[in-house]
Image (cartoon, rainbow, N blue to C red):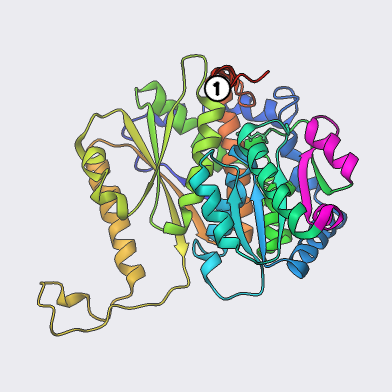
Amino acid sequence: MIKTDLTGALSFIDEKELPGAEDKKALTDLLDGKIGRGGAGWLRLPEDYSDAVSAAIRSAAYQIADNSEVLVVIGIGGSYLGARAALDLLRTPYYNQIKKRTPDIYFAGNNLSGEYLEQVIALIGGRNFSVNYVSKSGATMEPSAAFRVFKNLLDSKYGAEGARKRIYTTTDGEKGKLRQLTDRKGYTSFAIPDDIGGRYSVLTAVGLLPAAVAGIDIDELMSGARDIMNKDKDDVLQYASARQALYRQGKKIEILGCFEPSFRSMGEWWKQLFGESEGKDGRGIFPVYTEFTTDLHSLGQYIQSGERSLFETFVSIEKTSAAIRVPKDGELEDGLETLAGRELQELNRAAFAATKAAHNDGGVPVIQLDVPQLSPYYFGALVQFFELSCAVSALISKVNPFDQPGVEAYKKNMYAILGLQK
Ligand code: PA5
């Protein structure tokens, strides 16, 4: 299972603090439902996942794959990032370019750029497509604008009834404009439970439907999440507790780093989860994601010897399947001839060990999360692991992990600029 290794952080914090009595209480109160009511419905998702839930999602995925060469997933924030993370990590960031039997997947409604939308439309071209509109509130401007564009395209291409059959919505079970539209039009739809906020919703149809369309084994994924809930949560607590202990020492920035580029979208999901859950009331660790070794040639300098207000959390993937080796080449004469015959993964592992030691020597506390491999099972486990540790960490720092009042400020201004009613 996922392990938290704190050896690189212990010279910066008192081991006895980890986890403190209050930290343990935050976890047990959360699990016992004493705190977080109204926002902690994601805790029961792995247990509630049944054959019926699985079959409904897989049946919609088969239907999409049967009549569409492309699925457009429309959503933003928590209604977008988890699906993208699953796709990149469990298939490949080049998913749309590879030969496969499942539909291409494009994401839209995660920005307001007309350029971006035109590029997606051009890429779809004359191909058959369906749309999965994901919005809990059904009233978020970015996805709402994009949905209008794609609904219009579907209407013109397939007629109103044909379009109706190609629109799948994932939204609140009872409330909101999208639920009303869904009921009126009879779209195939999935409900997001009321007590699950966007950034904690990846293990509902929000993430599971696009994952199933991409051919990912969603049952395996949920089984990983279930095992996090069923086993002891020491590693979850260690991570949450160490983050807060470091924060109290003035380490205000957390850099999550991974040496696998396919982890990038997961890093974006993690950034939103922790940033939106913790950054409030004038407090919170600022979350940054870095891709290594790429960013060693960019942010590496700062991490090594810039301001000492940061700590790092490395996600270490223990087993990967790639076996590619550096070939022998007598012409290069660049001093790196001894690389010949070595596996790239050996170099990557060496870079990880070297980076961890160098940053640690440079005064950066390092937390290491060991993940046995990149698989649906461990993806589900990692999602549940991060959600739990995030909620506990926010509770330790006495903020509500499940609201996000701050994101309303820019929306209010934008509505005023555009002359819209909010
Ligand atoms: O985590 C959150 O709550 C947000 O990031 C939302 O997911 C995001 O704002 C999109 O909201 P909605 O699903 O209502 O369109």
Q: Position of residue 27 (x, y in %)?
A: 63, 30
Q: Residue at x 50, y 23 (%)?
A: 279
Q: Is mark 1 within 8 Å of ligand 1?
A: no
Horizontal relation, residue 196 to residue 76: left or right: right
- Give the percent coordinates (x, y) of residue 209: 72, 54
Residue occupying image coordinates x 46% and y 18%: 283
Q: Which residue is tagged 1?
A: 414
Viewer-nearest residue: 314 or 17 = 314
Of residues 363 and 153, which is closer to you in this image? 153
Say if residue 237 shows up in the picture: no
- Quick check: is 181 in the magenta stretch? yes
Tell me the quadrant of ligand 1: top right
| Amino acid identity at mark 1 | Met
Q: Residues within 10 Å of mark 1 (few under 14, many from 20)?
A: some
Residue 202 is covered by the magenta coloring: no
Instruction: Using the rendered view, name the quadrant where residue 327 is placed.
Output: bottom left
Residue 184 image offset from top left, x and y in percent: 90, 40
| First to last magenta residue range | 159-185
* Residue drawn where x is 21% and y is 42% of the image: 301
Provide the secondary structure element on which disc 1 rests: helix
Up-down: is 378 above or below 101? above
Quadrant of the image containing the N terminus: bottom right
